[in-house]
Image (cartoon, rainbow, N blue to C red):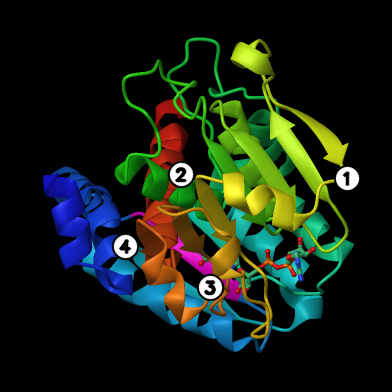
Amino acid sequence: QNLNYNLRQNYNKSSLQYLVLKPYREELKATIKSRGIKPKLVGFLANEDPAAVKYAESTSKTCEETGVTFELRKCDKEQLEDQIVEANEDDSIHGIMIYYPVFGDRQDQYLQNVVSASKDVEGLCHKYIYNMYHNKRYLDEKQTKKCIIPCTPLAIVKVLEYIGVYNSVLPYGDRLHGRVITIINRSEIVGRPLAALLANDGGKVYSVDINNIQEFHRGTGLKLKKHEVRDTNLKIEEILPFSDVVVTGVPTPSYKVPTDLLRDGVVAINFSAFKNFNDNIKEKASIYVPAVGKVTIAMLERNLLRLYDYHNYQS
Ligand code: NAD
């Protein structure tokens, strides 16, 4: 009840995000201060996308507040690969991120793999993505090093944990059992990894893109150890009324989720730079989260500190 009260009182963009990220940011700040360390993150900006520029500015401000050294390196697309290689080899740099899209095609996937896994704060290289899709949660046999999870999907998981969509009574790894979640976006950076993460945690996930709707699930009674995917012939009108959670990331200003199709009390989360929900969403949703960018940056810093420690434990 208290939680609901707080959320309703803070029913705006920055506050809900702030409530979610606050404990992570405070822990990070305290750790950096008490250990006297100076983790360094380098961000590469090779596009003119205003959303990327805004994200870079916001990252810089947050890093300054938490004690992380952040350096933004602007460069030409064609120079980016060499610059990443140089940063991979530079021991003073602990984390590398790239503001996508750069080329906007498969070359971006190649660039994700040029970043060394030991510095990949975004969790987008093959090793981390593979582990995530295969529900492999640790990097080592002794289970001391957790895998790095892509930042935006991880931020959305943290929002869902905070607002209680994850049922903490259930065992870790099964806490979304019984939840139906629709994700409108199946990009390789956010939508598809998010669908896999939520299905691995026990949810039944409908993944919607411009072409079709897929179902990600672990079977009845969560019989499967990791999620499987099947194509469906379903239409969005058929799944929205049964979805407990609807997450949207359609990168166009004209796209709006029809509020009348949503179930009363839905949890509505938008991560697109554009508002994918109409203003009347607040009349239907129990919780509406209009953006997750700030939580994403907190996860970026959290991943950075993990990589910093993994590097130091190894040496
Ligand atoms: P993308 O272009 O790679 O993917 C867009 C996805 O939306 C695709 O799966 C596409 O099929 C789907 N789509 C497009 N139109 C649709 C429609 N009419 N119906 C159903 N599906 C449709 O984009 P992206 O990189 O995933 O980014 C999406 C948005 O999220 C952008 O606005 C971006 O700025 C934002 N973003 C936010 C964060 C954050 O807040 N942390 C992080 C990454 C991206």
- Quote the CA–CA distance across marks 4 and 1: 35 Å
Q: Is residue 115 left or right of residue 259?
A: right
Q: Picture quarter containing residue 313?
A: top left
Start-end of magenta stretch = 39-44
* Residue at 48% from the left image edge and 83% from the top image edge: 54
Dot placed on the residue nearer the N-terminal end, 4 or 3: 4
* Other residues around mark 4 within 10 Å, as few (<14) / some (14–19) / many (≥20): many
Q: Which residue is mark 1?
A: 233
For badge 3, the amino acid type reads Phe
The residue under label 3 is 277
Q: Nearer the viewer, mark 4 or mark 1?
A: 1
C-alpha distance separating marks 4 and 3: 17 Å
Disc 4 marks which residue? 17
Q: Label 1: state its secondary structure.
A: loop
Judging by the rendered image, the residue that carries numbered circle 2 is 157
Which numbered disc, 4 or 1, marks the residue that appears first in the sequence? Answer: 4
